Amino acid sequence: MKLKSKHDGFEFEAYHAVPTDVRRGGLVLIQEIFGVTQGIKDLSDGFAADGYEVLAPSMFDRQEPGLDIKRDAEGFAKGRGYMQANGWDNALGDVQACIDALKGPVFITGFCYGGTVSWLAACRATGLSAASCYYGGGISGLVDEMPKVPVILHFGKKDSHITSDHWDKITGVHPDIPLFLYDADHGFFSQDRDDYAAEPAHLSRLRTLQLFHQASTSKVEA
C-alpha cells in the first residue's frame, strides 16, 4: 500500500500483512538496509499470524523504489549509502505515517538498521505503545535519546559488529531497559539469513509478544 511521509509528504510503499483471526494491534516492522526483502515479508506475515496488522515500509524509496538487494559486499555498500542519504528525519516521517495508518495499540520492531529506527521511534514518534529492537548497532550512538514507551533490546553475543562496548554504553545510560543477550550471531531472528538461530529467535519472539501484550493491557501510549 502507498503512504505519505509525515516529514516531507513523500509517497512510499509499505508491505501490508493482515491477521486472519483476532486482531491484537498494529505493528510497524522496519527492514534491514537491504530493503523489503522476501525475508522481511515473511517476518511480517508471521507477526500477522500472531494477530498483528503489519506495515513494513520501504524505507529507501527516495533513493531506489522497491529496493531488494542481496546481502553481499556490493549490496551492503549500497544499503549503507542509502541509509546515510535518507537520514533520520525521513525515516521517522515514514514511520509516523505507518503508525498513524494503523488502529491502536501500535507497536514497532526492526532489525539491524530497523532496530535503530525502532529505538528512535520509541523516543520521538507519537502513537506507539512499545518497541522491540533487534541488533540495532546505531543505538549506542543515540543513548542520549529517552524512550517514551516500554522498550526491550536484543543482541547476539557472537555478533562481531555489535560488541560488549555497545551493550555497556546502552546499559550505562539506560540501566532499567531490558537488554537481552543470546548465544547467536548478528541476524539471528530472520530465517532467510545464514546466521539464523532457531532457539534465540523463538525466545526473543516470545519476549517481544509478551511486551506487546503487557503494553496493550496497560494502555501505554506516547
Image: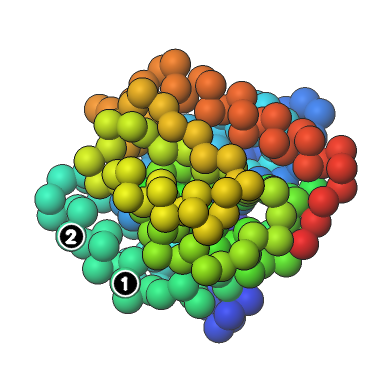
Q: Nearer the viewer, residue 138 or 181?
A: 181
Q: Residue furthest left?
A: 73
Q: In percent of the image, x 57 and y 54: which residue is there? A: 174
Q: Is residue 135 visible?
A: yes
Q: Left or right of 180: which side holds 141? A: left
Quarter of the image where the C terminus is located: bottom right
The image position of residue 103, as x and y in percent, is 80, 52
Residues under labels 2 and 1: Cα distance?
Answer: 11 Å
Q: Residue furthest bottom?
A: 8
Q: Looking at the image, what colour scheme do you see? A: rainbow
Q: Nearer the viewer, residue 50 or 108?
A: 108
Q: Residue furthest right?
A: 218
Q: Nearer the viewer, residue 36 or 183?
A: 183
Residue annotated with mark 2: 77
Q: In percent of the image, x 56 and y 33: which residue is there? A: 45
26 versus 204 height, above or below: below
Name the disc covering residue 84, or none: 1
What kind of residue is marked 2?
Ala
Where is residue 138, by image quadrant? bottom left
Quarter of the image where the N terminus is located: bottom right
Q: In percent of the image, x 46 and y 24: which residue is there? A: 201
Q: Left or right of 57: which side holds 21? A: right
Q: Is residue 41 visible?
A: no
Q: Give the structural element (helix, strand or loop) at label 1.
A: helix
Q: Residue furthest top?
A: 199
Mark 2 and mark 1 in contact? Answer it, CB < 8 Å. Answer: no
Indicate which disc, 2 or 1, sits on the residue closer to the N terminus.
Answer: 2
How many residues crowd mark 2 within 10 Å: few (<14), some (14–19), many (20+)? some
